[in-house]
Image: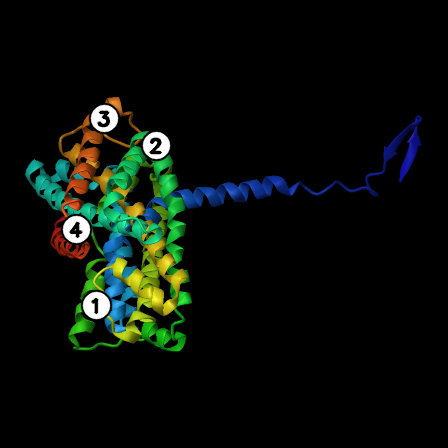
């Protein structure tokens, strides 16, 4: 309603109350906070997810085929164990402001740092060879191409990603790839597990002296903690992430929260891997020696879609962890020799760092083409990681 005053219409305030504040600003603020939270926990989520490399995939498939659902609770037990290690690594990187290799060098000297360097380097290289080979085989399962022809292109593509992309861009790509791990969840559902038995086995631990059960439990726990996972966490938090995300009580709290989320994500995906194998191959008590063999064996039992999804999950696990292995190798060698390093550095100013990165891939491709079996490399990676991990943790 209006009243004419001086020939001009005037709104009566009582009849026309002010319009409510627009929701755009509120929604934008919430969106920014959500993006900020996801960005802050991204390093831990990526570090945790990288723990589910093809070595873990093969282990979970073999254990599920041999023991069925009996060790489902062990897969979930990985969450608190990995969470503790990742929280410590996040604290070290955030508070000390450096990666583990640099901090060891400053605190304990070059000799102790050299021991850490060699232990991580050996684990990284053997795991790099095994995972590169597994990734190529995964592509081969989907395309029908001999995996030997795919090893070098896969390695070159990943080197190109690290040479061209900056740290934020590389991590951004890897974060999106993490969604591919959900392929294991879909494969597990398509396998039609016995959900009641699975729930009991997941929530109520049952101990057994059976050799397969004991060995499978130790294998699941042994592959959960590898040195490159927590080393990469300290690199991200202490070296690459912006100071506003790491410094202060809020930044430290977010780092701890992200470490927990990453550990839970890793354990849940590992659980789905085991379920997919247990629900199919476990019924047949069919021996499985690798993730690739598990994907092939799923086809006649659970159908081609479940098999293809498992192969896709295998590819995602390899492609996600390979850049981390390559980059962390360059970081720790660069830290030991005080080179300029970082994925955000141009190649011309960090030649040593990128040379180590490229050389590690070249060596991995050469070893992979030497016709060493995939399972041999995966087992070797697990054993060496088991010996090398305590050095970094101590």
178 or 132: nearer the viewer: 132
190 or 74: nearer the viewer: 190
Residue found at x 16% / y 29%: 338
Q: Earlier in the sequence, mark 1 or mark 4?
A: 1
Q: CA distance from mark 2 to mark 3?
A: 14 Å
Which residue was labeled with disc 1? 217
The quadrant in which residue 187 appears is bottom left
Q: CA distance from mark 4 to mark 3?
A: 29 Å
Which residue was labeled with disc 2? 165
Q: CA distance from mark 1 to mark 3?
A: 43 Å
Q: Earlier in the sequence, mark 2 or mark 1?
A: 2
Task: Give the percent coordinates (x, y) of residue 283.
Answer: 30, 75
For discs 4 and 3, the disc positioned in front in the rendered view:
3
For discs 2 and 3, the disc positioned in front in the rendered view:
2
Task: Give the percent coordinates (x, y) of residue 329.
Answer: 19, 39
* Mark drawn on residue 350: 3
**Secondary structure beneath disc 1?**
helix
Which residue was labeled with disc 4? 393
**Secondary structure beneath disc 2?**
loop
39 to the left or right of 259: right
In the image, residue 232 sits, relative to residue 192, either above or below, namely above
In the image, residue 353 sits, relative to residue 26, either above or below, namely above
């Amino acid at each position: 309603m209006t009243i004419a005053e001086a020939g001009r219409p005037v709104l009566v305030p009582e009849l026309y109350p002010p319009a409510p504040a627009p929701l755009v600003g509120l929604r934008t603020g919430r969106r920014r906070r959500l993006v900020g939270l996801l960005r802050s926990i991204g390093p831990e989520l990526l570090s945790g997810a990288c723990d589910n490399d093809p070595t873990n995939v093969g282990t979970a498939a073999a254990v599920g085929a041999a023991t069925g659902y009996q060790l489902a609770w062990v897969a979930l037990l990985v969450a608190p164990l990995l969470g503790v290690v990742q929280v410590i690594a996040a604290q070290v990187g955030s508070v000390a402001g450096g990666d583990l290799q640099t901090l060891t060098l400053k605190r304990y000297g070059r000799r102790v740092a050299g021991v850490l360097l060699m232990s991580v380097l050996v684990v990284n290289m053997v795991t790099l060879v095994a995972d590169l080979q597994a990734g190529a085989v995964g592509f081969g399962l989907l395309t029908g191409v001999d995996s030997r022809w795919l090893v070098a292109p896969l390695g070159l593509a990943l080197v190109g990603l690290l040479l061209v992309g900056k740290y934020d861009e590389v991590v951004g790509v890897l974060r999106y790839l993490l969604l591919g791990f959900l392929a294991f969840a879909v494969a597990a559902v398509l396998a039609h597990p016995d959900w009641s038995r699975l729930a009991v086995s997941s929530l109520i631990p049952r101990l057994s002296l059976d050799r397969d059960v004991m060995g499978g439990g130790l294998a699941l726990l042994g592959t959960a903690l590898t040195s490159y996972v927590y080393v990469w966490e300290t690199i991200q938090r202490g070296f690459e992430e912006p100071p506003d995300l790491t410094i202060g009580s809020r930044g430290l709290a977010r780092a701890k929260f992200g470490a927990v989320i990453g550990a839970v994500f890793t354990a849940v995906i590992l659980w789905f891997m085991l379920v997919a194998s247990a629900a199919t191959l476990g019924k047949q008590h069919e021996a499985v020696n690798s993730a690739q063999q598990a994907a092939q064996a799923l086809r006649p039992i659970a159908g081609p879609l479940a098999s293809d999804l498992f192969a896709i999950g295998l590819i995602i696990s390899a492609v996600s962890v390979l850049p981390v292995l390559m980059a962390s190798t360059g970081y720790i060698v660069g830290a030991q020799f005080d080179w300029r390093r970082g994925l955000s550095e141009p190649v011309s100013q960090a030649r040593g760092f990128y040379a180590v990165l490229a050389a590690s891939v070249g060596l991995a491709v050469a070893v992979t083409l030497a016709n060493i079996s995939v399972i041999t490399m995966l087992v070797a990676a697990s054993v060496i990681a088991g010996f090398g991990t305590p050095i970094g943790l101590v």
